[in-house]
Structures are given as structure tokens and as C-alpha cells.
Image: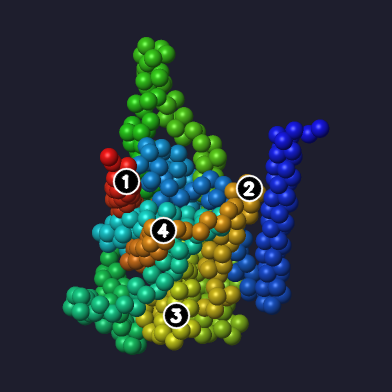
Amino acid sequence: METTESVDIKAAEKDAKAIERRNTFWVFFILGGLILISLIYAGVNIYYTYLVVYIWFGLAYGMMLQAGRFCMASASRDLFAAGVPRMAVGIMVALIFFSLVQAFLHATDMSTFHPAPFGIYLTLAGIVFGIGMVLAGGCASGTLYKVGEGNGTSMLGLFGICFGQALFVITPMNALVPQAWVQRSQEVIAAQGIPSEYLRAWFDYYLKGYISTKPIYHIAELDFIKNTFSGASRFFIGDALLNAIVPAVLLLVVIYAFYVRKGFIKKVRKKKGKSGLGDELRGFWGMITASKRTTLMGVLIGITAGLHIWVLAGMRHKFAVENFGQLLTKMGHAHDVALFGTVFDPGYWYITSQEAQFGAWVLEKLGIDMRHNIFFGVNNGIPELWRNPALWMSIGIILGAMVMSLINKEFKWKAPKGELIVFGLLGGFLMGMGSRPSLGCNVGAFFIRVAGGDPGGWMYFIGMAIGAFVGVKFFNWYTERKMAKQMEAFDL
């Protein structure tokens, strides 16, 4: 006769097998669907294979982000609130490896990377983004992979990112625009052949009247580096070593000193009675390898991001184009592209601009003019959703994270409740508003830029760190205040 306990065990095993079968079905359904979509695109026109590349690299990013739990919001929260450096360490490791891959691509003339204007605006925008990512519970990349896990708060955050950006760039606020921006903008668009009707909102004047005046720095192209190091070595010395590896290692040392060293050295001295340099190095290395999964995913993300650049550079060479907008025009979709025939096509891992395009596409369908401005009308275009390569990359990230979470039995629909609804939406809008002035998010404005030799990426990182610290402090205050109110009911 079976006991109640054995019956419960068999029932649990049966449920586990049913969940595993269901998850396996959805994994094959997603992968099969993407294969079918890829074949359809290739069958319609060979030019669409360019778009298909974005789909599958997006899938790869999503799987690795989910497997490594890579999220800069989580890294900030873990570090500042709990003193756990695992995620922050993984991000620095990924940055180091990606910088080496980027240097190789530059050296072989296969890079699609381009640096951005340098200025304090990066730090200010990073602060806004940093606060937003902590409130929403995920950075731009973290939000996407958490959507793939079924996280409802992240879905609201993604909604905020999409429409926060789209509305942000068309908001008038022209009364606040400095006259110097207005004059400079008019001069720039006249020189570039842009009709005056594209200068409408404050962000148009910001881009043409302010950002256009900022210097652009690429470490390997600085005269000092070019004159000191010849050939390909300047990319490895300037971009990788000086701009990425040395600062990343210094940050790892700081993290070790403030969050790991005290506890580790205390254990060593308790066991041996003393400690030395060898112990410090072992402690530092132990911090790096404390989470092999996160560190490994960091290495793979760095390598994959480099491979993504190399493949797209090859596609551009194959089709003799510099931008996917040229292929869209050849296929008869001129309405998708911006004024000069281009569309947002970063050529590497990037997030947020394509979400802005999605928001603009929806708003345009509702009758709002989204094309007569600099951001969409001149720079990025608003392609139909199914012809947007970068948007397909974001969809790939979501689906890749979904596949990995199903494999790991971590997928679960989680509806947001109470204040999480407000935090998700508000955080998403702040991330959207923080990513536009800086021309990128935690991936495009920090990770890619730093690894590519653009020192402006560190300016954005400083802002993100400040914003994340403020966000964590706010959550600590909010939680303590909420708990205090709840405890009042028990006061005698």
C-alpha cells in the first residue's frame, strides 16, 4: 500500500516531467519559428539575409544574458545594497574580452564601430538612466531578457523605454532651447541640405546645435598613439589596453578592496596568522572566478559581440552598402528610410534606438507626425516592424532569453502588482529619457563605446553608477518606510 508521501512524490515527478515536456515543445517551437522566418526572408529577397543576421545574433545575446543573469541594474543593486560583486565583476570581464576582439576587428579593417561626441552630457544622461534602471529592476539589456523570462514589471519597463524615447524626442519645450543652439542648428542643416521643417522640437536643436559641436575621440586615432605605436598595435594598446582593460582592472581592484578583501583576508589570517601579496592575488582571482557561470557568459558575450561586428561588416561588403537603408530602397521600401536613405543599422550590439522606432511606429499609426524631426526623419527612419533589422535583434534577445529560461526551468509569468507597476513604467520612461541625450544606453553608450576605444563610454558609466546608487538608496528608504508603516499596526 502506498503511503501519502510516496503518492505526493510520484505526483511531483509527474508534474515535473509534464513541465519539462511543455518547455521542450516551446523551445523547439521558438527555434523552428525563427528558422521558418529566416527561410521566408531569404526566399523573398536575398537582401533580407542581412536582417536575418540580426535575428540570430539577438537570439545568442538573449541566451547568454539570461544564462549569466547579466544586468547592470542587478549588478548595481547587488553591489550597493548587498555588497555582492558577482555581476559587476562579470560585466568587467566581458568588457575586457570584447575590447580585445574590437581591437582585432579594427586592426583588420572589419569593424563597424564609430565613436560618439564627448561631453558632460553623457554623465548627466547616465544619471537619469541609472535611476531608471534600478526603479524598473533591469537595464536596457536586462529588461529585454527579463521580458523573455515572463517578468511583467520588465514588460512595463520596456513599454516605458519604447514610448518614453519616442515622446521625448518630439516634445516641444522650445522655450528652453538656448539661442546658440538655434543659430548653430540652422547653420548645420543648411550645410547638410536638411529642410528647415525638420527643426521642430527641442531635441532637434539639441542634436544639431549642441551635440554637433562636441569633439569625438577615438583613442587609437589620437596623434600621440598613432605616432608612438605603428600599425595594428595602436588598437590593442590604445583602444583595448588603455581605454578598456586598465580602467576595468582598476575597477575590479576597487571592488575587491571595498567588498571582498576584508572578509577574505580575515579568514586567511585566522587560518595562517598572517597574509601576504600571494594571498591578495588569490583573493582577487577568487572574486573573478566566484561565479564561473557569470564570468564564462561574460567572455562569450564579448566574443559574440565581436563576431557580430565581423559578420555584419562582411554582409556590407557582400552587398556593397554601408547601411541597410540602401537595401530597403533597392527593394522598393523608400518610405521606411530617413531623409538621406538610411535607417537605424548600428552594425553591432545595440539597444533602445530600435525600441524608440517601435514607439514612433505606433504613434505614427495613431496619426502623430513622427518623421519631421532629426532623430527619426533624418537619422534613423521608421521602418515597418517586420523590416527593422535592429528591432529584430531585440526580439531575438527576448526569444533567446525565453529559450534559455525554458531550458533552465526558470520561465514564469509574473504579473506586476502595486507599486511595481509604477516603478516599472516610471523606470522605463527614465531609461528612455536617459538613453536619448546620450545617444545610447548601458550597451550602446557604455559597453560598446568603451570596448571600441571611445573614452566617452566611461563618462556615461560614471553617470550610471551615480544614478544607480541614488536609486538603491531610494529603494532602501522606501522599503524601510513601508515596513515601519506596516509595523505601526502592531504597536501597543
Tell me the amino acid under the disc marked 1: Ala
Tell me the residue at 60%/60% (across/down).
Answer: 399
Query: Which label's residue is closer to the chain start, 3 or 2?
Result: 3
Residue furthest right as drawn: 1
Q: Which mark is residue 489?
A: 1
The secondary structure type at the circle numbered 2 is loop
Look at mark 2 in the image and give the residue it sits on. Answer: 409
Q: How many marks?
A: 4
Which quadrant is home to the N terminus? Answer: top right
Query: Which label's residue is closer to the chain start, 2 or 4?
Result: 2
Tell me the amino acid under the disc marked 4: Gly
Confirm or deny contact between disc 1 and disc 2 (CB under 8 A). no
Tell me the residue at 72%/56% (across/down).
Answer: 25
Look at mark 4 in the image and give the residue it sits on. Answer: 418
As drawn, 261 above or below 476 = above
Query: Which label's residue is closer to the chain start, 3 or 4?
Result: 3
Tell me the residue at 67%/61% (across/down).
Answer: 30
Q: Which mark is residue 363?
A: 3
